[in-house]
Amino acid sequence: SQKIEQNSEALNIQEGKTATLTCNYTNYSPAYLQWYRQDPGRGPVFLLLIRENEKEKRKERLKVTFDTTLKQSLFHITASQPADSATYLCALDDTNAGKSTFGDGTTLTVKP
Amino acid sequence: GAVVSQHPSRVICKSGTSVKIECRSLDFQATTMFWYRQFPKKSLMLMATSNEGSKATYEQGVEKDKFLINHASLTLSTLTVTSAHPEDSSFYICSASGPTDTQYFGPGTRLTVL
């Protein structure tokens, strides 16, 4: 069956360090993968989209990698700040489905 | 750009009543809108996908007569929870996509059924 796993439910790091979040999937043929940020009681906010033929995408302090052989995406936040504390969701868009399926999210806490 | 609004942000209703939630794309035309439900500390569960002018496609296990979706224009979709019961209490979020593949989410509606 199809499955999306985000590495851990919670991740705590010190300010200034790089946060690395993992998204693994099985039994998908994703056309692309997206990462979102969600704050408590709010809707998700789009961060980055990476397509199956792209290895890496960057946006300011954010970097996403996509390895279709390993069936994994890594999401990095460099020089992390307390304001980066939030839940981060990965979403897969299956080639055939035309819709996104979301992982359960990883809640990141950046301590000052 | 790419702003999606939802109204109301919070609603409390009595069991048995119906509640309508609106989702609007404010600065782009949304060919497709999605409705999600989210439980505490859980991810988004897709309820249905709607395309402007056509019937919504519901996910397995979602009752179409319970959750009525109307996508009458390229900027507005509505979700009506009919005869709401306490188990329908949840956080409902809509999203809209336009010419790109990205979904833009609304701020969500917290529904509490007493």
Image (tube, rainbow, N blue to C red):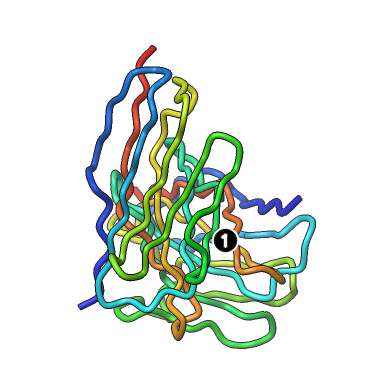
**Residue ranking furthest to the right:** B27
Q: Is residue A84 left or right of residue B6?
A: left
Residue A1 point in image, percent of width and height: 20, 78
> Which residue sits at x=43%, y=19%?
A16
Q: Which of B113 and B51 lies nearest the eye of the viewer? A: B51
Which chain letter goes with mark 1? B
What residue lies at 34% left-to-right and 54% top-to-bottom? B43
Residue shown at the point (76%, 68%) measured from the top left: B29
Which residue is label 1 attached to?
A: B95
Q: Residue at x 46, y 81 (%)?
A: A95
- Position of residue B78 relative to residue B112, above or below, is below
Local SS, label 1:
strand
Say left or right for B107 vs A105.
Answer: right
Q: Quadrant of residue B105?
A: bottom right
Label 1: how many Cα within 10 Å (few below 14, some 14–19, many 20+): many
Picture coordinates of residue A27 (x, y %)?
26, 77
Q: Position of residue B70 (x, y in %)?
A: 61, 76
Q: Quadrant of residue B63?
A: bottom left
Q: Is residue A29 above or below residue A77?
A: below
